[in-house]
Amino acid sequence: MSKSDSFECIPGSMAAELIRSESDVALFDVRDSMAYRAGHVEGAAHLSEDRLLAWMKRLPKETPVVIYCYHGNASKTYAQMFVDFRYTRVFSVDGGYPALDMALSAAA
């Protein structure tokens, strides 16, 4: 499988670096809406299946897409959907929200 037809699983520290270094990152939280409302990474949009198509219509295919969930499992499903729609830079955060939140807090 080549890089262009797959997403990349990255640790929270690498995702945090990507978020800080690129201004056009699309950051998505795919946890349930209650968890999202209780706390999410700054700048993250809540993404559910019913809103997926609307986002895909708006985002350029070369936009870096970073997706996190609770632990890093559900985000892989969403990441694959973006890849299926020919997004070229798609990342799933290993360890989910806690890993990314900790990495971003440590660097702040």
Image (spheres, helix red, strand yellow):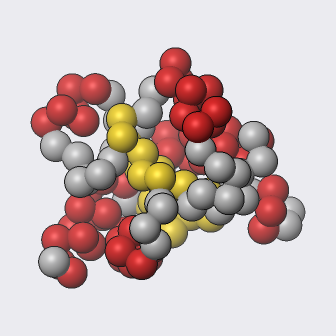
**For this view, does 36 lie left or right of residue 45?**
left
Q: Nearer the viewer, residue 38 or 62?
A: 62
**For this view, does 94 lie left or right of residue 16?**
right
Q: Is residue 71 visible?
A: no
Q: Nearer the viewer, residue 74 or 20?
A: 20
Please give the name of the residue rendered at 43% of the width and 33% of the height, measured from the top-left corner: 47
Q: Is residue 58 above or below residue 7?
A: above
Q: Residue furthest top?
A: 50
Q: Is residue 62 visible?
A: yes
Where is residue 9, by image quadrant? Answer: bottom right
Quadrant of the image containing the C terminus: bottom left
**For this view, does 46 lie left or right of residue 59?**
left
**For this view, does 20 lie left or right of residue 103?**
right
Q: Position of residue 85 (x, y in %)?
A: 75, 40
Q: Nearer the viewer, residue 98 or 106?
A: 106
Q: Position of residue 64 (x, y in %)?
A: 57, 61
Please give the name of the residue rendered at 24% of the width and 70% of the height, measured from the top-left corner: 104
Where is residue 98, by image quadrant? Answer: bottom left
Q: Is residue 28 above or below residue 53?
A: below
Q: Position of residue 103 (x, y in %)?
A: 26, 72
Quadrant of the image containing the N terminus: bottom right
Where is residue 91, by image quadrant? Answer: bottom right
Please give the name of the residue rendered at 42% of the width and 78% of the height, measured from the top-left corner: 21
Please give the name of the residue rendered at 55% of the width and 34% of the height, measured from the top-left corner: 55
> How many labels were placed on the picture?
0
Q: Is residue 25 above or below residue 17?
A: above
Q: Position of residue 8 (x, y in %)?
A: 62, 64
